[in-house]
Amino acid sequence: MAAGGSASRRAQEARRQERLLREQWHAARQEAHRWEAASEGERRVAAQLLVLTERGWRLLVDRRWPGTRAANVDMLLVGPGGVFVLDIKNWRTAPETSGGHLSAGGEDREEHARKLLAMSRTAEGAVASLGLSPVAVQPLMVFAGRRVDATLGLVRLLGEHEVGPVLMKEPRRLRPEAVRAIADLLERAFPEYEASTVIKPEEPQPPGASPSGDDGLFDVEGLRDAALEEAMRAPIEQWMTFLHPDQVALVRRNWSGPARISGPAGTGKTVVGLHRAAYLAQRTTGRILYVTFANNLPRVQSTFLKTMSPAVASRVDFRSLHQWAQEFLRERGVEVRLHGDKAETAFSLAWKHTGRDSRLAEIDPVPSYWREEIDHVIKGRGLASFEQYATVRRLRRGTALRRVHREAVWALYETYENLRIERGVHDFNDVLSLALAEARRDGAAESAYAGVIVDEVQDLSLVGVRLLHALVGDASNGLLLIGDGQQAVYPGGFRLTEADIDIRGDRGQVLRTNYRNAKQILDTAIAVVAEDAFEDIDGTRTPGHREVDLTYRDGQVLHCVNPTLTEHDQSLVEALLALSPDEQGDAAVLCPSIRAISHYQRLLTRADLSVCLLEHYDGHPVPAVKLGTYRRAKGLEFKRVYLPRHDETITSPSGSAETETERRQLARSQLFVAMTRARDLLWLGSVRSS
């Protein structure tokens, strides 16, 4: 090929596209001039938009606004980039946005923005029956004869020259059949005036269709299936923002106080939470706080929300619980001296002096069990006296402790606290306790947020839940708790009633349809925890095997058993190398421990496989195999999940007969979480000598 040949071809294609656009523009101008009722400004804007109709968009012009006597909507535009409600303005002076207000020529024009938002909400209600999230409808104010590109809250302001190019650059969100169905629905919901025009590009008739059409009717179930199919073909990051039509009602629900969404793995709880955050941000002036326990999830969830609803993403704060608490204390001038290593040293010394030779060694001589008891039961619950600890029900701690053992635990706790204070350091539980005390002081945190959404709530401590409740109290739509007790990956637990949170009645919603896992994968995962009944945070005793409805059945579970670790690891590498780069980007290798992560990072890197650690993953698609622990994978999902040596944690002895049952149940819960991250394929590796 001659030098510059590729550039020459690109230049020729650019000139061809320019000629095509010019032809489309002239045709659009002629069409727009046929609208006698429209002003010259509206005709020029319409000409810009008519060019889009040659590229799969539908334009509805001058429609009646349902629910009003005579008000109209200038234009509704539906296309691959979404649904847009347009208000066309031909003002004598340029619009100005200052301090969140709209004006022109010194006159207040706020009522125009309010009217456009109200129109958009009418459109949201109309398309909800098709399963479109409210964030799919976007209001645009377009100014004839002006060059404008600005935002005013949820409203985007564009000039007549900017509107066409901006919409043409919108990422593809809707397939042609979805565009057709949504436009047909809006055409009926917003009736036309007698002289108005609906622009419909010529569309090929599907096989078997009647030439005269179907009188505007469409197959809702078919559209839903098409949306599901499109989402499953896309990168897993796009799948994570897919909202099933049956979940739209929860996004739009008006709750009179704290509410909870629960349900088995794969039922879309996190996706509902993200859409709920965007919905609340659209309808309130305050900020929304979206909290989870894991440090990596806020970064990923923030990316997903920016993909779904960029207009409101800046008004939602994504934080881990401890990250938010530290920021809050810093703003309040409260000193925090968090030092994990020094706190760990203080506990080691406390165990040496008080625990090692006490009655605790009768139950478990391994100090980590008793560190968990202090972290999750005593400090996690905010217990202030031995009398409280002596009678507390130790949820998710199956090992029975007599009073003499609880006395020994309390002595260990007091020694640890004294040593920690001597060293002038805090641990992670202290951060939450300090923040709770500060939040309760004179209503310090009251009304700081219009809403708080808590994801994976079962992994939080009781003190953490009390802290978040203190931010919004029992306000309507203030606190939404999302999670499932079966997917708890930490010891200890609590009941919502202990945090004075009441979700009785319709404020406790259970999702029962699995949208993520193939049947084979879910059956394999459920078999691991089928015998492990659990008590959820609402106090409900729930069996390990729960029935769910499935939407996806075509999946695969591969069992790979090798006699040696070397052969096992080689099988894993070969399986990953067989994937294409795109397939590797949708795959994850999950391990139970940080030590195992280090081993497999070296192994995959030596095999020239690109690796992205989950602690660095931010939700953007990357052509690399994800690698992380079971706990880091919480709240995420992948098309293909590989679990090397998956059965070791649930079969290896714990070293203590007293606590082994409890430890193995926790290990099964963690493995269950890891297995249910898989959508299409689950690879289970084992090392067995015989």
Image (cartoon, rainbow, N blue to C red):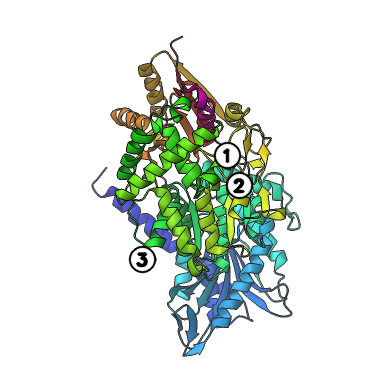
Q: Quadrant of the N terminus?
A: top left
> Extreme bottom residue here?
106
Residue 600 visible here: yes
How many marks can you see? 3
In the displayed structure, 306 sits above or below 458; it is below
Q: Are marks 1 and 3 in contact (CB under 8 Å)?
A: no
Compared to residue 529, the image places residue 490 above or below, namely: below
- Disc 1 marks a residue whose amino acid type is Leu
| Residue 235 showing in the rendered view | no
What kind of element bears circle 1?
loop
Q: Can you tell which mark lies on residue 334?
A: none
Q: Which residues are magenta?
A: 656-666
Q: Quarter-wise, where is residue 279 in the image? A: bottom right
Percent position of residue 207, x then y: 68, 44
Q: Main secondary structure of the magenta part?
A: helix
Q: Which residue is mark 1?
A: 395
Q: CA distance from mark 2 to mark 3?
A: 32 Å
Mark 1 or mark 3, which has the lower sequence index? 3
User: Which secondary structure lies at badge 2?
Assistant: loop
Marks 1 and 2: CB-CB under 8 Å? Answer: yes
Compared to residue 181, the image places residue 396 above or below, namely above
Q: CA distance from mark 1 to mark 2?
A: 9 Å
Please indicate whether residue 147 sits to the left or right of residue 517 in the image. Answer: left
- Drawn side of residue 207 relative to residue 364, left or right: right
Task: Read off the residue under disc 2.
Answer: 495
Q: Is residue 267 magenta?
A: no
Q: Check if residue 659 falls in the magenta segment.
A: yes
Secondary element under disc 3, as helix, strand or loop, is loop
Residue 426 % position (x, y): 36, 51
Disc 3 target residue: 333
> The disc labelled 3 sits on which kind of residue?
Gly
Label 3: few (<14), some (14–19) or many (≥20) C-alpha neighbours in 10 Å: few
